[in-house]
Amino acid sequence: MSKPKNFEEAKSFKGPLYYSYKVFQYVFLIFLVCLSLFPFVVMIINATRSTHDIEAHAVSLIPGSNLAYNFKVFAGKSFKPATGFINSAIVSTGATILTVYFSTMTAFAIVAYDWKFKKAFFTFIMCVLMIPAQVTSIGMYQFMYSVGLTNKLIALIIPAVAAPSTVFFMRQYMYSSLPMEILQSARIDGAGEFRIFNQIALPMMKPAMATQAIFAFVSKWNELFLPMILITDKEKYTMPVMVAQLNGDIYRTEHGAIYLGLTLTVLPLFIVYFLLSKYIIAGVALGGVKE
């Protein structure tokens, strides 16, 4: 069979089997997108429905007319979205800054310097990654209580300094994207190590840092376990803790209000993701580069 000479011939050259396969690919991908978005659509719609309607039909694609009542339920359960948003924003922003900066600094120390126990240190960091947070929760609470940091938002921010997964990601990125020659040139010119890190290394790490900042922010915003054991003051509750409190009525559970609280909690994450999704895709691709 001769090769096609133009675009029309190329289309017929590929044959119907090729286009059937392409159609199947698109249909399958559209199905996956709908499957991924379906829980969020149900959550948003249920936020406008009454508890009776949700208990009768948990899944519905028709919005209800109970949105105003669900907002009124918040007042009776001491649910304060503004307070929760502020507390979550403070914790998530502070934790994200600490996570990204100090994890990048740790990765820089592993990549840019040769020292005796470097591999053992990195192995230890990876071992810490294997330990669930629940295992260390008792020790964490006792430590925070002994230093007087319970019921303070800073107790939720400081632990973010230790982020093994971020250290691993930044290390992999630096091995492929941080030229050692530039660092050596800066040292020859008399630049100090902190200046090299802050003014040379950090600007080169911006794509990876942006990606990890998104992941760290989302993870900290959704965190429930640590705030539940360290914070008992209602004025210091984050959004996930406030939503969890909505489900604590033993007489009647207002499912519509719970869905509304979940929607308000997730809404900022949607905005952050849609604004910065290109950094996530680029950063994941860069982090997959092998040494």
Image (cartoon, rainbow, N blue to C red):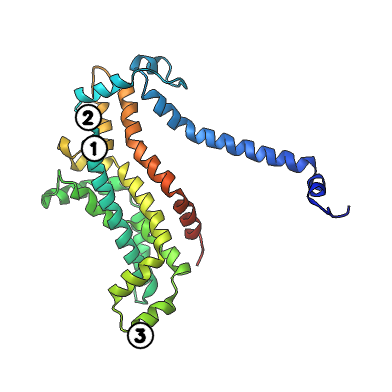
138 or 91: nearer the viewer: 91
Mark 3 or mark 1, which has the lower sequence index?
1
Q: CA distance from mark 3 to mark 1?
A: 50 Å
Tag 3: amino acid: Ile
Relative to 263, say whether 196 is above or below: below
Q: Can you tell which mark lies on residue 84?
A: 1
Q: How many marks?
A: 3
Q: Is residue 10 left or right of residue 259?
A: right
Q: Secondary structure at mark 1?
A: helix
Q: Residues within 10 Å of mark 3 (few under 14, many from 20)?
A: few
Query: To which quarter of the image does residue 46 belong?
Result: top left
Q: Residue sitting at 29 percent across and 56 percent down? A: 97
Task: Find residue 83 and report its horizontal and vertical position in percent.
Answer: 21, 37
Task: Find residue 215 and report its horizontal and vertical position in percent.
Answer: 38, 50
Tag 1: amino acid: Gly
Mark 1 or mark 2, which has the lower sequence index?
2
Tag 2: amino acid: Phe
User: Looking at the image, do the residues carrying marks 1 and 2 touch, with CB atoms under 8 Å apart?
Assistant: yes
Q: Residues within 10 Å of mark 2 (few under 14, many from 20)?
A: many
Q: Secondary structure at mark 3?
A: helix
Query: To which quarter of the image does residue 52 belong?
Result: top left
**Mark 3 sits on what residue?**
188
**Mark 2 sits on what residue?**
79
Q: Residue sitting at 15 percent across and 46 percent down? A: 152
